[in-house]
């Protein structure tokens, strides 16, 4: 399969990263004049990076990789931190609360670092962001709002905003209430006296001089400041548009809650003489109860929490799947994501090119996924850990090596990692919820029949032989549909409402152990 074959197939492939990447081909039929395509992700450094940060960067990276398949035009990814934003609220989880309260209103890049490790709170959180992105191997360039404003990178576009002041106000004002309309201004001067980012009405503006004036809210004095050089910051919707124009951003995603903001910023970008970037609005994640995840409530699932129980690829897969659909982000989605990732990776080598390009594993790895030999699923491992009643990896490997000769922690490192993930997940989420119930009369008779069938087969049979007897026992007992029989097996033998393919479980756990579970349920 040549690169030409792959590119040809990618031109019509329906995987969403390719659909997004083709927007960029249409955007520049003759190629971009600046010689590259710029992707951007934004970050507010008032808090630490979270799972939404990961989701936006990994999805943007998938589109960037898809574009690289379609085109030889170079690309860049900018991770932009709005660290010049005013410090509005002191988070409860930070030390030095009184000190921080004394700096409310100042740019995050001017607020002292309460941890004492960086020049400012903004710099501290920026460092955490970069470490977070580096941890996952993302290819990006970091940009600081403060550096861009103070270094002059935004000056020319800021002057355009001032020159088109009335048109910009015409976009924003209709979206505001009467009180806010009376005081709104797109420019936020930094007070020379206090360093605070001021939200004050402007009393005058001079496009030729590049300045704005306002009345000091404390002294009443008229103050005139340049809009360039970091003396003013823009209100965020105008700021977003200005950044797109100044940096030449071609693609940026945003959450569904920002659809209106994307529209407004796009209109402002056009006023400033530029085309807004391509992109799409992804759905937000929901908590266990189906409610919106809130950082302040802490009702979501964090990146570190996910990675305690599964590898990053499973989290990336969850981000890849149905990005325009609201999904629950809770611990119970992890096992399915793990097994789906390995299933996609295992299927990849045998697929034709079009199916490979639509396989999530291709987009997670930016090409061929690594070859992984995984003889059993994470779900089956969880059941083994639960029933075996052990957290000793060596004991669990004893079961696995017996069922799959030639496997060991040394020969199958991915499986060894999965064993340890399963131990932690079962301990924290499965074992506390186990509740085996007593079988009713029909179930007890079917279990006794199954026990006899398994005894007749004897140890050492394969999973299919055991599975066939499980089916036959259920049919003989008159279970219709048969899923009721399997549900009864899970509830009486394992203590869960769903479970593994029983033949595979019996082969893994061993005939003696499986018959022991049946004996326990019958007594």
Image (cartoon, helix red, strand yellow):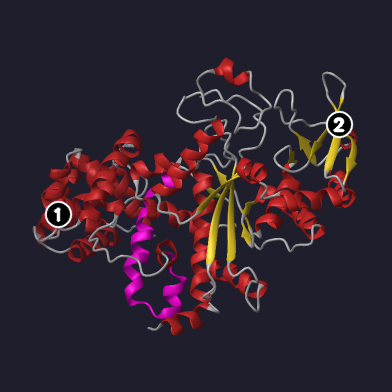
* Residue 184 seen anywhere in this rendered image of the structure: no
Chief secondary structure of the magenta portion: helix
Frontmost residue, 46 versus 355: 46
Relative to 303, does residue 359 appear above or below in the rendering?
Answer: below
Residue 96: give its label.
none
Say few, some or many: other residues with alpha carbon within 10 Å of mark 2 (under 14 / 14 to 19 / 20 or more): some
- Residue at figure coordinates x 68%, y 52% from the top left: 243
Which of the 4 image quarters holds residue 406? Answer: bottom left
Of the two numbered discs 1 and 2 on the same chain, state the one appearing first in sequence: 2
- Residue at figure coordinates x 83%, y 24% from the top left: 216
Secondary-structure class at tag 1: loop
Per the rendered image, the range of residues in magenta is 332-360
Relative to 503, does residue 224 appear above or below in the rendering?
Answer: above
Residue 516: x and y in percent read 14, 44
Give the labeled residue for mark 1. Answer: 410
Relative to 457, does residue 29 appear above or below in the rendering?
Answer: below
Would you say residue 479 sits in the magenta stretch?
no
Q: Quadrant of the N terminus?
A: bottom left
Which of the 4 image quarters holds residue 253? Answer: bottom right
Residue 473: x and y in percent read 24, 59
Farthest front residue in view: 209
Report whether 160 appears left or right of 29. Answer: right
Report whether 316 appears left or right of 486. Answer: right
Q: In front of the other: label 1 or label 2?
A: 2
Residue 214: give its label.
2
Q: How many marks?
A: 2
Frontmost residue, 409 versus 465: 409
Q: Quadrant of the C terminus?
A: top left
């Amino acid at each position: 399969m040549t690169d030409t074959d792959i590119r040809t197939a990618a031109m019509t492939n329906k995987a969403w990263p390719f659909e997004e990447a083709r927007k960029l081909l249409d955007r520049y039929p003759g190629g971009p004049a600046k010689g590259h395509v710029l992707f951007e992700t934004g970050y507010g450094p008032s808090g630490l990076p979270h799972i939404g940060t990961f989701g936006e960067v990994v999805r943007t990276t998938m589109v960037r990789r898809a574009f690289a398949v379609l085109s030889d035009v170079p690309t860049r990814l900018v991770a932009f931190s709005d660290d010049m934003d005013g410090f509005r609220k002191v988070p409860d989880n930070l030390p030095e609360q009184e000190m921080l309260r004394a700096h409310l209103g100042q740019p995050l890049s001017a607020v002292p670092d309460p941890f004492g490790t960086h020049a400012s709170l903004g710099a501290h959180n920026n460092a955490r962001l970069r470490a977070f992105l580096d941890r996952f191997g993302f290819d990006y360039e970091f940009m600081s709002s403060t550096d861009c404003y103070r270094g002059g990178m935004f000056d020319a576009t800021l002057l355009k905003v001032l020159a088109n002041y009335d048109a910009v106000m015409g976009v924003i004002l209709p979206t505001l209430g009467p009180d806010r309309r009376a005081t709104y201004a797109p420019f936020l001067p930094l007070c020379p006296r206090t360093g605070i980012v001021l939200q004050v009405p402007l009393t005058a503006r001079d496009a030729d001089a590049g300045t704005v004036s306002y009345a000091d809210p404390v002294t009443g004095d008229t103050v005139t400041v340049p809009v360039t050089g970091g003396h003013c910051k823009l209100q965020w919707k105008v700021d977003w548009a200005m950044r797109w124009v100044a940096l030449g951003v071609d693609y940026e995603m945003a959450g569904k809650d920002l659809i209106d903001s994307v529209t407004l910023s796009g209109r402002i970008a056009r006023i400033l003489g530029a085309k807004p970037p391509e992109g799409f609005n992804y759905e937000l994640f929901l908590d266990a109860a189906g409610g919106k995840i809130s950082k302040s409530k802490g009702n979501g699932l964090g990146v570190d929490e996910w990675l305690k129980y599964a590898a990053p690829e499973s989290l990336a897969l969850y981000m890849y799947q149905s990005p325009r659909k609201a999904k629950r982000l809770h611990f119970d989605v992890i096992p399915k994501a793990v097994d789906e990732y390995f299933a996609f990776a295992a299927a990849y080598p045998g697929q034709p090119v079009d199916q490979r390009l639509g396989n999530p594993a291709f987009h997670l790895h930016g090409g061929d996924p690594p070859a992984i030999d995984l003889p059993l699923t994470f779900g089956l491992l969880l059941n083994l850990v639960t029933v075996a009643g052990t957290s000793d990896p060596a004991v669990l490997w004893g079961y696995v090596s017996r069922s799959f000769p030639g496997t060991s922690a040394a020969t199958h490192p991915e499986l060894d990692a999965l064993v340890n993930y399963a131990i932690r997940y079962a301990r924290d989420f499965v074992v506390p919820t186990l509740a085996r119930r007593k079988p009713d009369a029909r179930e007890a008779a079917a279990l006794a029949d199954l026990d006899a069938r398994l005894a007749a087969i004897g140890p050492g049979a394969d999973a299919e032989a055991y599975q066939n007897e499980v089916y036959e026992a259920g049919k003989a007992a008159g279970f219709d549909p048969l899923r009721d029989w399997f549900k009864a097996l899970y509830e009486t033998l394992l203590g869960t409402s769903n479970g593994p393919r029983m033949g595979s479980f019996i082969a893994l756990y061993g005939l003696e152990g499986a018959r022991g579970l049946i004996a326990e349920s019958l007594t």
